[in-house]
Image (cartoon, rainbow, N blue to C red):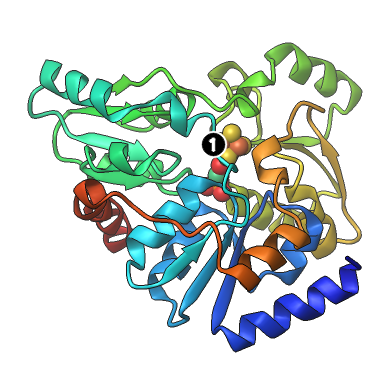
Amino acid sequence: MEESFLIKEINRLKKEKNAIILAHNYQIPEIQNIADILGDSLRLSIEASKTDKDIIVFCGVKFMAESAKLLSPDKKVLLPIAGAGCPMADMEDAKSLKELKKKYPGVPVVTYVNSNADVKAETDICCTSANAINVVKSIKEDKVIFGPDKNLGSYVQKFVDKEIILWDGFCPTHDAVTPDEIVTVKLKYPKVKILVHPEARPSVVKLADFVGSTSQMINYVKECEDEKFLIGTEMGILNIMRKENPKKDFIMLSPKLICLDMKKTDLTALFEALRDEKHEIIIDESVKEKARKSLDRMINVF
Ligand code: 13P
Ligand code: SF4
């Protein structure tokens, strides 16, 4: 189908069905352009919790659409590609988390939103990469269990006076970047600032000039007066940065920074999901309430 036809039909169906399209900053440009709201995980969760539309089409990966459903239980939430997942989220399971909790009785659990609903149900409070430091600081206990991302947890550890018990998960995309690559790039562009996501390895984070969520990086490049930047997160973000800053130059830190799951959604998948109302997110009744509470706590506090 022609792109112009798909765009027209998506917009028509959106009105007819009273739907909203949310898209993550890593989506392909065609999806970014048609989205009503484009953002990082935190912004998208907040928008999902406030919408008055009947249908939310979530262009991103499963944990994001699940969070939208948990926060807006009365809405129909659609994920255009049923198999768009997050490999890091799948590295933590509820059964093992329950066992870890038994080992550390009374120790609160902070879980990155990049997690499945059953893990959120075993969680005291969720966080995103944008608010992880503040969420952990808000805990009164001096020890916390943090999962699934060991890299984000290690990053948070530098800012808090608490012991963080780390889960052993990681993002295969961000964790693939090595400090050697940064050193090589630094030699080539000695004056160019390096921005990385906290999902990167600690040895890479150490070499960066700025560390933040996808939206925090987008804001940083807008406000900084430099003309060139090295970008250390998934390459979908470049389209947004280039569009918003036509006179600035953005270079990828590494060619490995591509998340295949984030690239699965295209206009055809979005059109078909909206037309047929397919791939609806259904959360297991047994975890729904508890998982929602862990997200609510995050949204209410930050
Ligand atoms: P943000 O919360 O920064 O948008 O990141 C989500 C994500 O999946 C990063 O890999
Ligand atoms: Fe998950 Fe990494 Fe993809 Fe983000 S970039 S969705 S953390 S696999």
Horizontally, is 100 left or right of 12 in the view? left
Pick out the residue farthest to the bottom. Answer: 16
Ligand 1: image quarter: top right
The structure residue drawn at horizontal position 8% and vertical position 24%, both measured from the top left corner, is: 105
Instruction: From the image, tell me which residue sits under label 1.
Output: 86
Q: Position of residue 191 (x, y in %)?
A: 83, 32
Residue 259 appears in the rendering? no
Indicate the secondary structure of the residue bearing disc 1.
loop
Nearer to us in this view, 42 or 91: 91
Residue at the image position 66 percent from the left and 81 percent from the top: 13
The reply to whether the residue tagged 1 has its Cβ within 8 angstroms of ligand 2 is yes
Disc 1 marks a residue whose amino acid type is: Cys
Q: Is 141 displayed left or right of 169 in the figure? A: left
- Where 103 sits versus 75, above or below? above
Quarter that holds the N terminus: bottom right
Please state the horizontal and vertical placement of residue 148, each as a whole percent of the image.
Answer: 40, 28
